[in-house]
Structure formats: structure tokens, C-alpha cells
Amino acid sequence: AATSTKPETLDQRIATLKTALKITPDQEVKWTAVSQAMRDSASEMEKLMATKRAIPPEKTTAVDDLKTYQEFTQVRLDGLKNLNSSFKSLYDSMPAEQKKNADMVFEKYSPSTPTQG
């Protein structure tokens, strides 16, 4: 699987994250909210993508392209806000050692900072 070029599915990402965060049975309810936020965000993005794909490229203008970019950015931002809210509740319930692990897990997945040139 490490050499696979096939992208990880949402369910695989959720399962991988759950394992990496070492979610306990007592944390399942809060974890369910986190995983649901991830699913809701993906669903909203898929709906927007389907809507945009239905429009033939020759029917869009530069202004339409910018509006589409804005819409995708807004859906991402809304999804991130929901995820952050549900994850904070889970994170706040974690013991110190588990928080330290979560910090390392998320550090590994953080977006790279663009270099200044």
C-alpha cells in the first residue's frame, strides 16, 4: 500500500486518523462528531464539484472561474470550521500524553509553508 498511487478514500483517512490519535472507547462519541464533520465537508465539496462539472467550460467566463474558486474556498473554510469545533471538543477531553500524540500527528499533516523568494 505504501507504493500505491491510488488516493486514500475518506473512510481510509478517517480510520487512519482514528488509529493515529489512539481514540479510546470513552472518546467514541466525540470522535463520531469529528468523523461526521469530515464526511459532511467531503459531501459538500462533492456536491459543488458536481454542480460545476455540469457547466460546459465554453459557457464560463474568467469572472465565473473566480467565483467558482471563491465558492470552493468557502466550502473548505466552512468544513474546516466545523471540523475544528468538533475536534476541539475531542482534544479537550484527551489526557496530556494523548494530546502530545495528537499534536505530533497533526504536525505531520500540516500544509507546508511556501518559501519566500
Image (cartoon, rainbow, N blue to C red):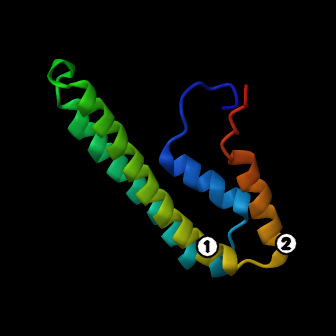
Residue farthest left in this picture: 59
- Distance of label 2 from label 1 (alpha carbons): 16 Å
Q: Secondary structure at mark 1?
A: helix
Q: Is 74 positioned to the left or the right of 2 in the image?
A: left
Residue 21 placed where, x, y %? Answer: 71, 62
Q: Secondary structure at mark 2?
A: helix
Report the residue at 49% width, 63% height from top: 81
Residue 116 placed where, x, y %? Answer: 73, 31
- Give me the disc on residue 42: none
Report the residue at 53% width, 66% height from top: 34
Residue 40 vertical placement versus 73 (above, below): below
Q: Look at label 2 and name its amino acid.
A: Glu
Q: Residues within 10 Å of mark 1 (few under 14, many from 20)?
A: some
Q: Residues within 10 Å of mark 2 (few under 14, many from 20)?
A: few
Residue for badge 1? 88
Residue for badge 2? 97
Asked whether residue 35 appears in the rendered view, the answer is: no
